[in-house]
Structures are given as C-alpha cells and as structure tokens.
Image (cartoon, rainbow, N blue to C red):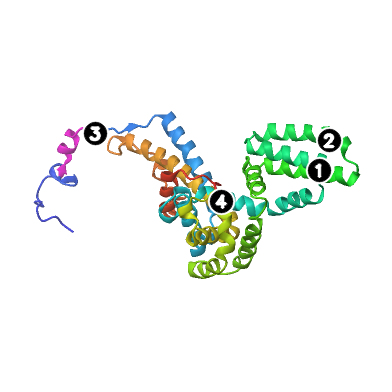
Amino acid sequence: MVNKSININTNWWNKPLWGDDNLFQSLKKPKIEKLAIPFEVVSHYQEIYQILIFIASVTQSIDSCKFLDPEFQLFCQIKWQFISECGNYKGLNHSLILLRAALEAKDKFLTLEETELRYRSKAQQEFYQEVYSLLSKQTEPHDFLVIVQDKLNQIRFDLKTEEGKTALESYVKILEILAEQNAIGLKLFYLFKKYFFAEFSSVKLLSELLSYLVPQNVQDINAITLIVQKHYDSIAPLGKILELPPEKNQIESYVIMLQYLVLRDKHQETYLLFTKLIELLIEWNNTHQELKRIHQEYSPNEYDIPATFNKNYPGESLYQKYQQFIVYFANQKLARETI
C-alpha cells in the first residue's frame, strides 16, 4: 500500500527507509547499544531457576486430590483453631494433648493398674508408693527412671516369686515407654494414681465412642453432640485428669475434642504430607522472589535480556492453587505435628 503522504517524485535518498525517517535522518540518529547482563548474574539466575524446577517437580509429585477434600479441609481448620486457640477452642489445646495421650496409652495404664492390684507384697507396695512419690515431685523423666530402676534392684531379692519379679520388671518397662512421651505419659499416670484410677473408665468410654465415630460422617457436629450428651455424666469426671478449666468442662468441649480426634484418625497422614507440600511451596515462593528480584534489577530498556530470563516459572499454578493455605501457614508458623 502506497503512503499518500509521500510525494512519488521525491528522490530515493529522501524516502523513508523504515518508519518516517529518510536515509540521512537514519544515519544521523545515534544507535543505542544495550548493556549485557554480567555473566555471573546470568549464571546465578540459571542456578536458581534449576532449583525452582526441582522444587516444582517435587511439589507436583506430592500434590493430591485429598488436599481439597471438604472433610480434610475441615480437619485442617479445626486443627489450626486448636493451635491458635480461637473462639470456642481457646484453652483446650493442653487438654486435647492429654486426652490423645491418655487414649493412646490406655492399655499401658490398664496393665500398670492391674499389676498394682494383683501384686501387693509389702516390698511391692513400697515400690508403688516410691513411684507415686517421684511422680508427685515432677521428677525429670531420666532421673525418675534411674531412681525407679535402682529401687527395683534393691527390692528384687525381697520378692518371693519369679512371677512377682517379672511383673515389676514389666511395670518398669511400661514406665520407660511412658517417659518417652516428653513426660506427658508419666504425668497422666500420676493423675490416674492420684484419683485411684476412678476416672479410667471415662477414658475407656471415650475410646469406644471414638471407635464408633471414626466410620461416621462427623462434619455435622450435631451427631457427636447427641452422643456426648447421652454419656456426659460418665465423661465429665475426666475433666480433672485432662486439667480442663471448670468453665470448659462442658459438653461442647468434649464434642469438639472428639470431632478433632475422629478427623485426626482419618486424615493425620494426609495432613503431614500436606504440610510438607506447603513448606516446599513456601520455599518455592522464596526462590521465585529471588528470580523476580534479579529481573527487576535489569530493565529490558537498558539491558539485553537473555532468553533464560523470559522463561515461565514452573510450579506457579500449584502455588496459586494453595496460596490461601500458604499465607496462613506463614502467618501462624504452625508446627507440622503439635496435637
């Protein structure tokens, strides 16, 4: 198409070579040479980009449709409310930790109780009393075990039967296992002994309720509420073992703790995998931000941008998919396994 603004009789050297400039105007214009980005910067960028590729690959291998399951997301929400002590969950985190530990160790507590009831020679009763005394003083687990083992060695020759010796040896081994729980197991044993195991039946009842509820849909909390209401008089005495504040020793507290424990039984393994994904995505974002920072330092108006700088960021869509969870994790600094 002929440009009508140009006279067809104009000499060729006055005709535009490109755009609106003729030959002389083009020659007069200074040629702008873009700067080269330093080699070490480009090399550093490429190294970081390879790290981004690796992180993206790992996150994609971890990603699962389970993470978007409504029940799993409810579990995450409840877990975070316990940890953050929000609303009705305030003041329950400590009691939930004790309840979970009590349920997990109930068979061990039962064995200890049965041993104390069955083997009752004078030496054995003195041994049980020494254990209780050490527990009441909140003796450090390591020191506690050393003293208990020393006491067992002292009375071993006073025990008349091999069965009695074996029973106390098993008793001490269970104490060793409980001591591995960062003193929580020993603390619970002390509390049960303090109240003569009167509340142990409440633990067994809650364990049965938990087993019943695991296959059920517990997203609707009303179903759990009806069950707890029915058994509340049998459950409530457990409040002092769980160190529930008096105002929290209510039906609602046991309902939300039971709901959490049911969901935990179903989804804890998925949650651990999910937290790993979120941690990697946080690392992905830190790497991504470093690449963006380098980009911003070298404007395309001034620098000759290599092709490497213009590549897409692998993993960006996955980061955006879970961004709301990433922000929450970063703000709350949630531990992978707290309760």
Residue 287 spot, x, y in % from top left: 45, 40
At label 1, counting other C-alpha atoms closer than 10 Å, the crowd grade (few under 14, some 14-19, many 20 or more) is: many
Q: Gap between marks 1 and 2, in whole Å?
A: 10 Å
Magenta span has 29?
A: yes
The residue shown at (66%, 53%) is: 104
Residue ID for mark 4: 240
CB atoms of marks 2 and 3 within 8 Å:
no
Range of the magenta residues? Answer: 21-32
CB atoms of marks 4 and 1 within 8 Å:
no
Residue 31 marker: 3
Residue ID for mark 1: 168
CB atoms of marks 4 and 2 within 8 Å:
no
Q: Residue furthest front?
A: 122
Q: Nearer the viewer, residue 266 or 116?
A: 116
User: If you read the primary sequence from the N terminus, does the residue marked by circle 4 or circle 1 appear first?
Assistant: 1
Quarter of the view holding residue 270: bottom right
User: If you read the primary sequence from the N terminus, does the residue marked by circle 1 or circle 2 appear first?
Assistant: 2
